[in-house]
Amino acid sequence: MKVLFFGSDDFSVPVLKMLDARHTLVGVVTQPDKPKGRGKKIQSNPVAEWSIRRNKRIFYDMNDSNIFSLDVDIGVVAAYGKIIPEKLLNFPKLRLINLHPSLLPRYRGATPIESTILNGDRKTGCSIIYVEKKLDSGDILAMREYLLDGRENSIKLRQTLSEVGAEMIIELLENMNNISPIKQDDSLAVYTKKMIKSDGKISFETESACRIDRKIRAYINIGSYFYLNGKRLIVEEADFEDVDSEKPAGCIISSKDRLAIQTKKGIIYIKRVRPAGKGSMAIKQFLNGYKGNLIGYIISDASIDS
């Protein structure tokens, strides 16, 4: 089958690789190079990098007239990151299909994986749908569930679901003549929003240890953080207990091998951090270099900049 692929990030790459191995990749539509990192150096996205190395035909503009000169059987979308114009929706013979990492109609929008973890769901999965004008609302062509163990972070879950989704796409393309699309129930739709850095701010006074643990795992890409003595500390790994000390919320109750902090409900144990301007380190390494006694220190929301 002749495939036109739309994708831009690491979630897209397993799908792209499998399509290239099993079908004819006639073109790749991806987002233009962007500045990244502290130095704002211009870099290609993972899809563009892969396509350039393999001499694939790349389009950085969906309105490029050359796209419409391609002989395309089907368009496959996986984490493209932009709204696809209506004139492209029915251009391929078999339309455009989209791989979405949730069990639609739950978690339409930009952050389905993060929302799954943040809400403590016990299962997630992938859906393949027709692309429609309305966001993630197309008829469902295939769906597969994936059970969670409750300790996933968004990076690992994203990688897992991209591999699950790649297999689903191949299976679907091999059985396109035997598909019975199922209409989504819009009344059950749950929408997600794009992440911003302030979403990762930790509040020991208003959030439970369970909620903070989920936030750390969900927002590992943008970083969940609090301020210790006025300096931002990004938390990369933690665990928790649903038990309370006699201390107030925000109080550090232990700082031996883990930083134990009383929350609104339960105790959060900080295991790995990234201090401002430094690399990732185990909490023990951070504590060894910290001057002063932290026991009894109150981490107050009032002292945190938003």
Image (cartoon, rainbow, N blue to C red):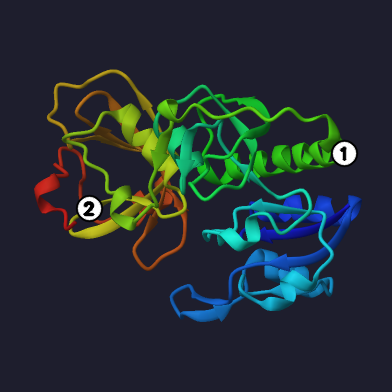
Q: Is residue 19 left or right of residue 267?
A: right
Mark 2, residue position? 228
Comparing 303 with 93, the one in front is 93
- Is residue 237 visible in this depiction of the protein? no
Q: In this rendered view, identify the residue nearer to me: 265 or 192.
A: 192
**59 w.r.t. 9: above or below:** below
Residue drawn 82% across the image and 37% down it? 176
| Residue 62 percent across, percent down from the top left | 62, 70
Residue type marked 1: Glu
User: From where the camera sits, is residue 83 visible?
Assistant: yes
Name which of mark 1 and mark 2 comes first in the sequence.
Answer: 1
Residue 143 appears at what percent x and percent y? 66, 29
User: Marks 1 and 2, how far apart in space?
Assistant: 55 Å
Amino acid type at image mark 2: Leu
Residue 155: give x, y in percent of width and height.
56, 46
Q: Nearer the viewer, residue 286 or 141?
A: 141
Name the residue carrying label 1: 174
Quarter of the picture containing the C terminus is bottom left
> In the picture provided, is 23 more to the left or to the right than 209?
right
**Element marked by disc 2:** strand
